[in-house]
Amino acid sequence: MIFSSKLIEDAVQEFSRLPGIGKKTALRMVLQLLKMDEQEVDEFTGAVSRMRHGIRFCKECHNVADSEVCVVCVNPGRNRNQICVVENIRDVIAIESTQQFSGLYHVLGGILSPLDGVGPEQLNLSTLHQRVKNNEVSELIMALSPTIEGDTTVYYIARQLKDLPVTITTIARGIAFGGELEYADEMTLARSIAKRLPIDNYVTMK
Amino acid sequence: MIFSSKLIEDAVQEFSRLPGIGKKTALRMVLQLLKMDEQEVDEFTGAVSRMRHGIRFCKECHNVADSEVCVVCVNPGRNRNQICVVENIRDVIAIESTQQFSGLYHVLGGILSPLDGVGPEQLNLSTLHQRVKNNEVSELIMALSPTIEGDTTVYYIARQLKDLPVTITTIARGIAFGGELEYADEMTLARSIAKRLPIDNYVTMK
Ligand SMILES: [Zn+2]
Ligand SMILES: [Zn+2]
């Protein structure tokens, strides 16, 4: 594409760095920003800038947070006996959006994937171990994507915590095997959590 | 969607204002920005901000420009006898990207569409008239989308300039009737311009 403005070219270039955004889509967005008032564009860049510079990660659960501890962990109404273990922040948003889960979360920051060089050290596993050991956690709900990597991660964690008095369950297979958690609709996701299975049944069912 | 961070929610909200960007896509972009270094995000917001505040519109042709006159108009290598009349900036980028047109442009800023309240006063028509009258323009190539509104605009301009010694041509119908110019591939677009027709033939052909 040949632009007749370096300013536009640079902005299109920056948008193209975002996932799934080709040059044409990037241009469309840039031209939309061009139509907006300067003040509206300042609000756009301001929100992005404040987000990136201001965001923190909850020291309890590794979820995104606007201060030291996230709004979920700080909420006295949440059930502290249940921790839902997820791969990433997008999964927390997906599950929170179902409004069906009242426990806490633990964001692993990935799943075990030797081929991609993701081993146990890359994940937030030691803090999970600490939380189970030190607190009144009675159930860990493994809400990982039903893939080989997700399963491997579930087994790894189960083995790591086998001597602690905690029940490990996995969300029900409402999601197709191989499917990605974040693409599930809210209803399916809510039902999967409600119909979760203890990890032994889960193994038997396979 | 329920976010557990106001910072993220605000940024997603801002991205959702862009065309064709739903909440899920906006979130995906925001989370990508979250993964980037703070400095990279500053480059992103900086490019957007500089673009919006710095952009100007060429005083000759109304194309986007980084200074008073755009890079096309300022280029001594361009053929000043031909002016390609387009609806918007996206069309200039599309035609420039074919690298087959060496003349100048005139960006109308829309096409006549009485139903949408776009009349002749809303378009850059008086400057077009001036350019044809005052300069050595021998041909106006009408590169408007082949729609009812595009045709109406072509006829309006042809009537307005009928007493001036200028040939008015339209780009060849390589583009399906009703199709939008900007979606045409570069080859089709280049061929359409090469095989343009004088406006009389164009009327006969219909
Ligand atoms: Zn937290
Ligand atoms: Zn110009």
Image (spheres, coloured by chain):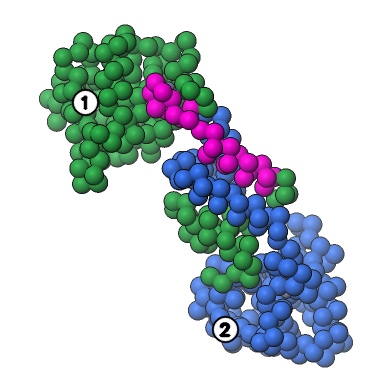
Chain colours: A blue, B green
Rendering quarter of residue A133: bottom right
Which secondary structure, mark 2?
loop
Which range of residues does the magenta coloring cover? B40-65
Which secondary structure, mark 1?
helix
Q: Position of residue B106 (x, y in %)?
A: 35, 24
Residue at the image position 50 percent from the left and 44 percent from the top: A38
Crowd around label 2: few <14 · some 14–19 · many ≥20 (10 Å): some
The extreme top residue here reads B136
Q: Are marks 1 and 2 on the same chain?
A: no
The extreme front residue here reads A39
Disc number lying in front (1 or 2) = 1
Reply yes or no: does residue B61 show up in magenta.
yes
Residue at the image position 76 percent from the left and 90 percent from the top: A138
Q: Position of residue A153 (x, y in %)?
A: 75, 72
Residue B36 is labelled as: none
Amino acid at the residue labelled 2: Gln
Residue at the image position 53 percent from the left and 70 percent from the top: B1
Is residue A169 shown to the viewer in this render? no
Image height of B192 relative to B163, above or below:
below
The subunit carrying tag 1 is B
Reply yes or no: does residue B116 show up in magenta.
no
The extreme left residue here reads B204
Q: Which residue is mark 2?
A: A100
The subunit carrying tag 2 is A
State the residue in front, A146 or B204: B204
Q: Which residue is mark 1?
A: B157
Image height of B114 relative to A196, above or below:
above
Rendering quarter of residue B160: top left
Crowd around label 1: few <14 · some 14–19 · many ≥20 (10 Å): some
Amino acid at the residue labelled 1: Ile
Tell me how many marks there are.
Answer: 2
Image height of B62 relative to A148, above or below:
above
